[in-house]
């Protein structure tokens, strides 16, 4: 109840700073549906507070139970090589502990743009390893994700390549042909880097869904449309969205509480899953996990979504610069 009162107070304060004017944002705000009892799957992406794979024994098991109690269903962690005995031992112990809980484990694989020259890109070897993991840990091992699946990176000084091109050249699809049907595969797709049609054409038959991310997550004006569009592109397969509560290279400021609440409101309504990046203990995230069953709370963050949309449209209007020389014809 205190959380809801705080949010309502914050809404009243913020409204004094957001003018009520007829605009696209205002129209969007009036179309926000009422909250429903729909629940999305919650994931923890390499959480800074819980590096589960680096823990052992009761400490590891208790940390898992803490994540589950908080409201998380999935745990994502990076594995660098199936041929490294230290890596495989960590993963095996992690899955043994997860077998005793309801937490699902998803392994993150890195492309060369992130994993570097020492990474393991033997896709057939990875699929064979994953098949063996699934046979031993049927309930706890859910599958794997490949990060930065359509990211663009610099190979030489003047040559840029989309990672999808590398996956095609390295015969990823041939390896995926041998993947057990019980193993889920999620490519991490960025909204801004394109090649979506190529991803669908080459890999739609193998993916269980997609993980959607944005480098421009400080703006949510088109987030709902984007989530719906990608769901349609991939034939209504589950779409999970990465929630960033940390700053990025473009913006040195942390996302505001209002922005995070607006993102949660939209993703709850449209996405099939929300994956919290690193800071799972963020106060807004914890409030959401604790209160998302409350219609009052969901209505309150819906109000914050409305205010965020108005703010973004107002900011866009202020950033429009009229060129005097263009008007004068000079």
Image (cartoon, rainbow, N blue to C red):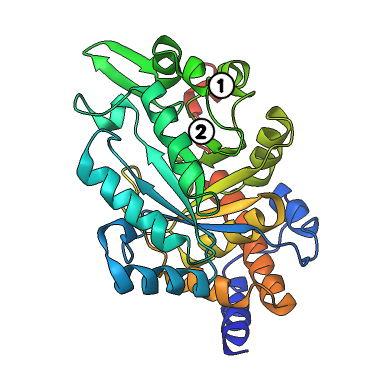
Q: Quadrant of residue 61?
A: bottom left
Q: Residue furthest bottom?
A: 2
Camera sees residue 246 = no
Q: Quadrant of residue 118?
A: top left
Left or right, residue 246 beside residue 176: left
State the residue position of label 1.
Answer: 199
Q: Residue at x 34, y 22 (%)?
A: 122
Left or right, residue 154 beside residue 118: right
> Quick one: 195 or 123, which is closer to the camera?
123
Q: Does residue 136 lie above or below 306 as drawn?
A: above
**Are the residues at dot 2 and dot 1 in contact (C-beta closer than 8 Å)?**
yes
- Position of residue 314 measured from the top left corner of the image (x, y, whole percent): 59, 52
Q: Residue at x 80, y 65 (%)?
A: 34
- Position of residue 67 measured from the top left corner of the image (x, y, whole percent): 45, 69
Left or right, residue 56 beside residue 179: left
- Position of residue 40 measured from the top left corner of the image (x, y, whole percent): 65, 58
Local crowd at mark 1 within 10 Å, few (<14), some, or many (≥20)?
many
Q: Does residue 281 lie above or below 87 as drawn?
A: below
Q: Which mark is residue 290?
A: none
Q: Does residue 111 lie above or below 92 as drawn?
A: above
Q: Quadrant of residue 228?
A: top right
Quarter of the image that includes the N terminus: bottom right
2 or 1: tag closer to the N-terminus: 2
Q: Residue at x 45, y 61 (%)?
A: 98
> Could you say whether the residue bearing mark 1 is in a helix, strand or loop?
helix
> Quick one: 96 or 215, which is closer to the camera?
96
> Quick one: 174 or 287, which is closer to the camera?
174
State the residue position of label 2.
Answer: 189
Camera sees residue 101 = yes
- Position of residue 211 measured from the top left corner of the image (x, y, whole percent): 54, 40
Q: Give the distance between the C-alpha atoms of the residues marked 2 and 1, in whole angstroms.
A: 9 Å
Q: Residue at x 33, y 15 (%)?
A: 160
């Amino acid at each position: 109840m205190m959380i809801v009162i705080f949010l309502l107070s914050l809404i009243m304060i913020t409204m004094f700073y957001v003018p009520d004017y007829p605009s696209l944002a205002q129209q969007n705000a009036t179309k926000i549906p009422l909250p429903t009892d729909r629940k999305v799957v919650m994931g923890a992406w390499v959480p800074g507070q819980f590096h589960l794979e680096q823990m052992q024994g009761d400490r590891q098991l208790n940390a898992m139970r803490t994540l589950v109690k908080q409201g998380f269903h999935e745990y994502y962690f990076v594995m660098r090589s199936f041929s490294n005995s230290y890596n495989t031992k960590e993963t095996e112990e992690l899955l043994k502990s997860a077998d005793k809980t309801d937490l699902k484990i998803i392994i993150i694989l890195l492309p060369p743009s992130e994993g570097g020259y020492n990474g393991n890109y033997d896709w057939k070897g990875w699929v064979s390893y994953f098949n063996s993991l699934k046979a031993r840990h049927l309930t706890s091992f859910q599958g794997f994700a490949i990060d930065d699946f359509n990211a663009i990176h610099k190979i030489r000084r003047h040559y840029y390549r989309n990672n999808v091109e590398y996956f095609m050249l390295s015969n990823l699809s041939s390896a995926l042909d041998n993947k057990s049907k019980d193993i889920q595969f999620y490519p991490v797709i960025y909204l801004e880097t394109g090649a979506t049609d190529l991803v669908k054409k080459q890999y739609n038959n193998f993916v269980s869904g997609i993980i959607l991310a944005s480098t421009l997550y400080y703006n949510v004006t088109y987030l709902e449309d984007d989530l719906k569009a990608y769901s349609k592109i991939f034939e209504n397969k589950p779409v999970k969205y990465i929630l960033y509560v940390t700053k990025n290279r473009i913006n040195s400021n942390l996302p505001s509480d209002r922005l995070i609440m607006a993102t949660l409101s939209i993703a709850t309504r449209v996405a099939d899953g929300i994956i919290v990046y690193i800071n799972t203990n963020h106060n807004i995230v914890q409030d959401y996990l604790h209160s998302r069953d409350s219609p009052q709370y969901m209505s309150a963050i819906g109000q914050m979504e409305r205010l965020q949309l108005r703010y973004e449209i107002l900011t866009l209007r202020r950033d429009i610069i009229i060129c005097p020389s263009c008007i004068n014809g000079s």
